[in-house]
Amino acid sequence: MRGKTKCAVHGGKSTGPRTAEGRKRCAEARTTNGWETRKIRQERSEGLARIAALEALGRSIGMFTGPRLLGRPPKQR
């Protein structure tokens, strides 16, 4: 690209937000990854934590036997 310093298609490297206000706006933005938002991921994580707690309670009173359900337990916050 004669006379240009950056590619018209790819542009320059993004430096991201630099100020505290810019970082805050970026953190609060409704960012998505595919169809998921942070809120959806948080709600799913909380639901899985409730299921894990109910399963642990059921096992402690002898309601469930056999192996634990598949998947890793959610992170405790």
Image: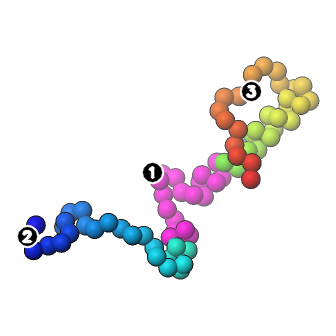
Q: Which residue is mark 1?
A: 34
Q: Which residue is mark 3?
A: 68
Question: What is the number of the mark on residue 1?
Answer: none
Q: Which residues are magenta?
A: 26-44
- Percent x, y of residue 5: 18, 72
Residue 66, located in which quarter of the rendered image?
top right
Element carrying mark 2: loop
The residue shown at (90%, 25%) is 62
Q: Which residue is mark 2?
A: 2
Q: Say whether residue 66 is visible.
A: yes
The residue shown at (53%, 80%) is 21
Element carrying mark 1: loop
Q: Pick whichever, 4 or 54, lies toward us.
A: 4
* Tag 3 near tag 2, CB within 8 Å: no
- Percent x, y of residue 48: 70, 43
57 vs 18: above or below: above
* Amino acid type, residue under disc 3 in the picture: Arg
